[in-house]
Every structure is written in C-alpha cells, then in structure tokens.
Amino acid sequence: MARTVLVVEDEQKIRELLRGYLERAGYSVLTTGSGAEALTLAASALPDLIVLDLGLPDVPGETVAREIRHRAEIPILMLTAKASEDDRIAGLELGADDYVTKPFSPQEVVLRVEAILRRSHEAAGVARHTFGGGELAIDEERHEVEVRGEQVELTPTEWALLVALTGTPGRVYSRTELINRARGYEFASERAVDSHIKNLRRKVEADPHEPRIIETVLAVGYRLGLARDP
C-alpha cells in the first residue's frame, strides 16, 4: 500500500509540481493550500508525512505544525522562504523533522521525504533494551520508547538520535556523528542538532534543565548518561 503524503502549499504551481514528483516516486498525495484544511486532513486522513509550507495565507505554517505536534507525531518536512539560520532553527524547535529552503529542487524534496520515512519505519529487529534500571526502555521492533514506565511519542529524527545514543551508552558522539547516524547525511548546522536534542530532552528528562539521560559533553557533543541493563 502506497504511503500518503500531504502537501500543504498555497502556490498552486509548486503544489502540483510536488504532487507530480511524489506520485511518480510511488506516493499517494493529498494537497491543500489552506492551513485550516491541512489540520482537518491531518486528523482525518492520517498521512504518513506532511510537506508544510510556512507561508500560508490563512493559518501560519508554524501554527499548523504546532497543532499537528499536539495531536500526533506525523513527520513534517517544512518548506520555507526564510533562509536565516534562526528561522530554520525555530521551525525545528516546533518539531519539524527537516526543512527545505525555497527555491528548491522537487527531486530534493522527494529524497528528503524518502529519508524521513525510512527513518520513521526502520526497525533493527532486536530485542527490547532497558537502561538505568529500567528508567529508559527502547523496543526497536515495535518502535516504542518508555521513560519511567510511561510511553513517549518521538518524531522520526528524535527516535533516530535516541537510538544512536543508546548504541553505545557512555560514548560521546559529536554532533556530526549523531546527525550522520540519524539522517544519513551531514546536517548544515550544529544548532539544528541541539534543537532536536532540546526537544528530545523535553520528552525524556524528568528535568530538562538538569538532564541525566542525555548528557552534554562541552565542546564535544552528547552521550547517554544511563548504563545498559544486563
């Protein structure tokens, strides 16, 4: 069964261009130019991924992303004409998994969609692992994470970063290493890695301001602060 991609873009030419490329890549595509309709379609159709333009005429794309994140962990690929690093970081902090800056290549969008969905659905086929006396549990077959006995929902990028960190507890990973393991290509900005880690900490740490699961090693990167249980 083909995976469904919802394209939210107010410019009809771009919307139809992306539809054509995605359909040729084998996806079922829904489109809208309205942020309000995007929220309705996200709730009713439950797409596998949303390509979301930030410059929508009715509801700002940032608001759409925030509302979707409150309701579900559908992967989001943002399209933006805002080229500054601060703007892109702000989008990632809303929970986007990736972004593409306009003007863009439609083929690049397809490749980014494929990469996000691959990360979202990959499973290593290994047993459930626990860390810190059961404080953290990861089941890669079921694609589930539990923290202190409660299941938490992660975006595909957050999941991939956590799995990378748990690969070798205590090992320090540089930001470049983490993003290459999580996304398969080097990310342009270390600040973006920090934004994803910040979002991840909000979900897994008892106190995100004093993290003990995902520790920062100054001037180097991050490591898992919990030991793997026997």
Image (tube, grey):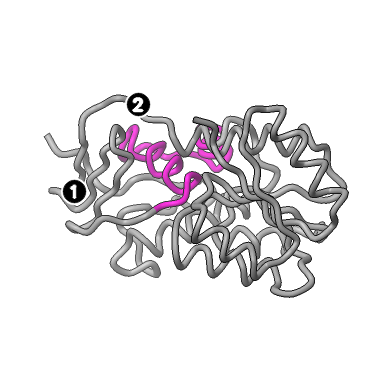
Name the quadrant of the C terminus: top left
Circle 1 packing at 10 Å, graded few (<14), some (14-19), many (20+), is: some
Secondary-structure class at tag 2: loop
Secondary element type, mark 1:
loop
Within 10 Å of the Cα at label 2, are there few (<14), some (14-19), or many (20+) other Cα atoms?
few
Q: Amino acid at mark 1?
A: Gly
Does the magenta-highlighted stretch encompass residue 215? no
Kindly identify the residue that appears in the image at 43 percent across and 53 percent down: 216
User: Which stretch did the figure color magenta?
Assistant: 154-182
In-front residue for pair 212/52: 52
Q: In this rendering, which labeled residue sits more in front, label 2 or label 1?
A: 2
User: Does residue 157 lie above or below 207 as drawn?
Assistant: above
Which numbered circle lies on residue 180? none
Decide which of tag 2 and tag 1 comes sooner along the chain. 2
Where is residue 54? Give x, y as percent. 73, 63
Can you identify the residue that label 2 sits on?
A: 124
